[in-house]
Amino acid sequence: MRRFLLYETRNGTQSETYRRLTTESIGRLRGRARQRPGETGGSDAHTLLRAGRTWTECEATDRDSFLAALSEGRSVAGGEDGELLPLARDVYAIIFSYYGQLFGRTRVRFETLGQRLPGALFCAATLPTHLIGFPLICTGVNQLAKRVGLQRIESALARVSEPLEIEVTEAEVEV
């Protein structure tokens, strides 16, 4: 089995349960030196509203020492776990940013009527669904589906009588 030196253990769009299960599973991957793989974190933000709220930490003084700490697995993930309302806020920010682009209210603009017209027609047709909360409902359903999947994974892991510890040789480590 191949092993990476770093794993994303905290993602700003994923739940605390996702983070816990990921961390526990990755904790079973140890090489001959019994070294735990390094962790990374990222906000997975598609807007500036959540950028930087989840991060990777290393003890370092500059770029080179930070990268060295990463390559040695001396990193941890910090910050926020994902929740429904901040994620839904991102979805709405993206939708209304698109409206702004169509009507020339942002730095990014559609130059010609031919570029704007299809988007404007689509927005006019879908505006009622945006106003009644369809994006919020879709985001909620997505979060619920993830929660169900994580419960299944957690249940399957709980049935394992002894946690499996996977030995990985240095030749199998993916850099």
Image (cartoon, helix red, strand yellow):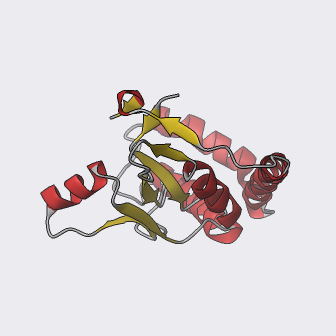
Picture residue at 75% right of the left edge, 63% below the top: 131
Instruction: State which quadrant residue 61 falls in.
Output: bottom left
Picture residue at 65% right of the left edge, 41% below the top: 121
Residue 11 in view: yes
Which quadrant of the figure contains the C terminus? top left
Q: What x and y, as percent, mark residue 18?
A: 66, 57
Relative to 120, 68 lies left or right: left
| Numbered disc total | 0
Instruction: State which quadrant residue 82 falls in.
Output: bottom right
Q: Nearer the viewer, residue 61 or 27?
A: 27
Residue 14 in view: no
Q: What x and y, as percent, mark residue 62?
A: 14, 65
Picture residue at 62% right of the left edge, 50% below the top: 25
Relative to 80, 135 lies left or right: right
Relative to 17, 38 lies left or right: left
Q: Nearer the viewer, residue 145 or 93?
A: 145
Picture residue at 48% right of the left edge, 32% below the top: 114
Q: What x and y, as percent, mark residue 77?
A: 45, 64
Q: What x and y, as percent, mark residue 2?
A: 47, 29
Relative to 165, 104 lies left or right: left
